[in-house]
Amino acid sequence: MTDQNHADQGFSTRAIHAGQAFEPVTGAVVPPVHFSSTYAQDGIGGLRNGYEYGRGTNPTRDSLQTQLAALEGGAMALSFSSGLAAEDALLRALLRPGQKVVLGNDAYGGTYRLISKVLGPWGIENQPVDMSDLDAVRAALTGADVPLVWVETPSNPLMKISDIAALAEAAHEAGALLVVDNTFASPYLQQPLSLGADIVVHSTTKYIGGHSDVVGGAVVVKDREVGEKIQFLQFAAGGVSAPMDAFLTTRSLKTLKVRMEAHSDNAEKVAAFLSERPEISAVLYPGLESHPGHEVAARQMKRFGGMVSIRFSGGEQAARTFTEATRVFTLAESLGGIESLVNYPSEMTHASVKGTELEVPADLVRLSVGIEDAEDLLADLDQALAALKG
């Protein structure tokens, strides 16, 4: 739950102190990592502070969950072994066979695969919708049993922006809950629960973890009753974050503000640089005034983040050549780490949605802009673009 002692404090103060009380025996300012899989009982059923078995509870994971709830302004947070483990528990806790999820037609490929390929045979339907079209969203919510509306904003990898407050209103009018994948923005740049959303999900592997060295996921809820349903699946199915993973994620959260500011600084420079290049047909970055979602993003985000997608005038081959020519930007999946990454979604992160409404254009490249010196990033992009002429 949210640590009420820090509820009125600033973001970084909460990030550093919520759930992070010093260890009482020695006074260690960093709480120890609790690796124990089981806990001694004071007689049968005599649990010490509710601790019984590591799959159910762990002090290090509890600290992270307190920290996450405090940063997202939620009543409760739950930490998982991956972002998809978090999504799976959420979906199975709140859906039943015969029901439908309305989700963005630009959702992350792994989310779509989970809903369509894993939960589909179980009887869960899905309807992809352009989340910027509120009339289309309302139409999808009409005449069907839709408990959940699922949106990413900014979206992966098309960088579309959706109006969270408006979507929450539309979902609530239809009796549905709004789930926002806040991975690209992070809790520092965007607070979906304060805008009317009911549930926030994260791949904590990305900006929250921030160093490309830990895999994890999280769910943060506005309503404790909803959270307890998901918590039961967390315990019963066991997709929990391990103690060291929870510790690494907690440590990274403490520097989230300074990292997101640096990511945003560099991404703005990268987007401006690429906007002037004839090799690029479109720069997809909500910080640009030319972006169709710029005004909404400026209203609901603190800054515009570190993700930039680009499309190439030379089509698919130009995109492939560029992607394999960078030197500072590393060709790899994932995003949100301190190092810059380049990804070709059509064959990498979004290969699973080929042939569907969510298929990613073959001329698109996604950049996760790190926190290196901006001059080195621009020089790398320049030499990679020069490779197109060869």
Image (cartoon, rainbow, N blue to C red):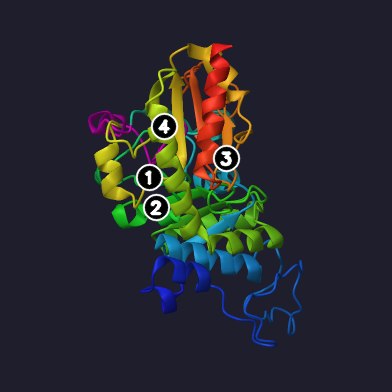
Marks 3/2: CA–CA distance: 19 Å
Q: Position of residue 276 (x, y in %)?
A: 37, 26
Q: Which mark is residue 273?
A: 4
Q: Which percent across, then down, holds residue 228?
A: 50, 61
Q: CA distance from mark 2 to mark 1?
A: 7 Å
Amino acid type of disc 1?
Phe
Question: Judging from the image, what secondary structure is the residue with disc 4 in?
Answer: helix
Residue name at image x 26 percent, y 48 percent: 299
Residue pictured at 24% horizontal, 40% vertical:
295
Query: At x 58% / y 24%, what residue is drawn?
Result: 323
**Residue 53 picture quarter:** bottom right
Q: Label for residue 304?
A: 1
Q: Which residue is mark 2?
A: 189
Which of these two is toward me, 122 or 249?
A: 249
Read off the residue under disc 3: 340
What stretch of residues is rendered in magenta?
131-157
Q: Mark 4 belongs to which amino acid?
A: Phe
Do we see residue 157 in this rendering? yes
Q: How many marks?
A: 4
Identify residue type, mark 2: Leu
Mark 3 or 2, nearer chain start: 2
Query: Which is nearer the N-term, disc 4 or disc 2?
Result: 2
How far, Cα to Cα, is label 4 from label 3?
16 Å
Residue 193, image x, y percentages = 35, 55
Within-10-Å neighbours for mark 2: few <14, some 14–19, many 20+: many
